């Protein structure tokens, strides 16, 4: 027979909080969640959290029956990596419309 632990329940590590941004039901073009940013051509930037970690995803979405759903096609960055990338975006070879890239960078920071 095992003994009961003498440690109090309050000393245990707190459980990770679930993400408040998970949305598996999709959304419509008129109800885009506040953490989604339309980048054009079915691409969205999604800011999400898992526990205490913030992630930035650039993901391809698909439209089905008027609802927009994420696909597996995309990339995910930690907030530090994304900030580093966005700070150096001016050095990347971008399309001639640099103003769009600057707006995206400033919106996400």
Image (cartoon, rainbow, N blue to C red):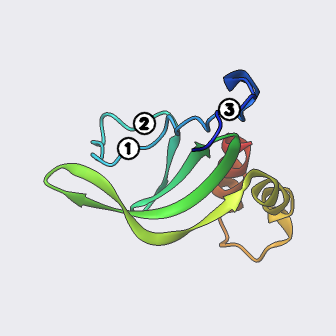
N-term mark: 1 or 2: 1
**Location of residue 6 with respect to 86 vertically, above or below:** above
Indicate the quadrant where residue 17 lies.
Answer: top right
Callout 1: 10 Å neighbours few (<14), some, many (20+)?
few
Q: Nearer the viewer, mark 1 or mark 2?
A: 1
| Residue at disc 1, secondary structure | loop
Position of residue 41 in the picture relative to residue 100 (left or right): left
In the picture, the disc for residue 23 is: 1
- The residue depicted at 75 percent of the width and 28 percent of the height is 7
Callout 3: 10 Å neighbours few (<14), some, many (20+)?
few
Callout 2: 10 Å neighbours few (<14), some, many (20+)?
some
Q: How far apart are marks 1 and 2 (CA)?
A: 9 Å
Q: Nearer the viewer, mark 3 or mark 2?
A: 3
Residue 23 locus on image (x, y percent): 37, 44
Q: Name the residue under label 3.
A: 14
Q: Mark 2 points at which residue?
A: 33
Position of residue 6 in the picture relative to residue 30 (left or right): right
In the picture, the disc for residue 81 is: none
Residue 70 locus on image (x, y percent): 37, 59
| Residue at disc 3, secondary structure | loop
Residue 49 locus on image (x, y percent): 61, 43
N-term mark: 3 or 2: 3
């Amino acid at each position: 027979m095992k003994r009961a632990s003498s440690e109090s329940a309050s000393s245990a590590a707190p459980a990770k909080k679930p993400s408040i941004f998970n949305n598996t039901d999709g959304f419509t073009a008129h109800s885009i969640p506040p953490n989604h940013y339309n980048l054009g051509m079915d691409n969205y930037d999604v800011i999400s959290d898992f526990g205490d970690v913030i992630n930035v995803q650039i993901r391809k979405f698909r439209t089905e029956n008027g609802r927009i759903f994420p696909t597996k096609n995309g990339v995910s960055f930690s907030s530090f990596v994304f900030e580093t990338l966005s700070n150096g975006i001016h050095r990347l070879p971008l399309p001639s419309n640099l103003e769009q890239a600057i707006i995206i960078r400033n919106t996400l920071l």
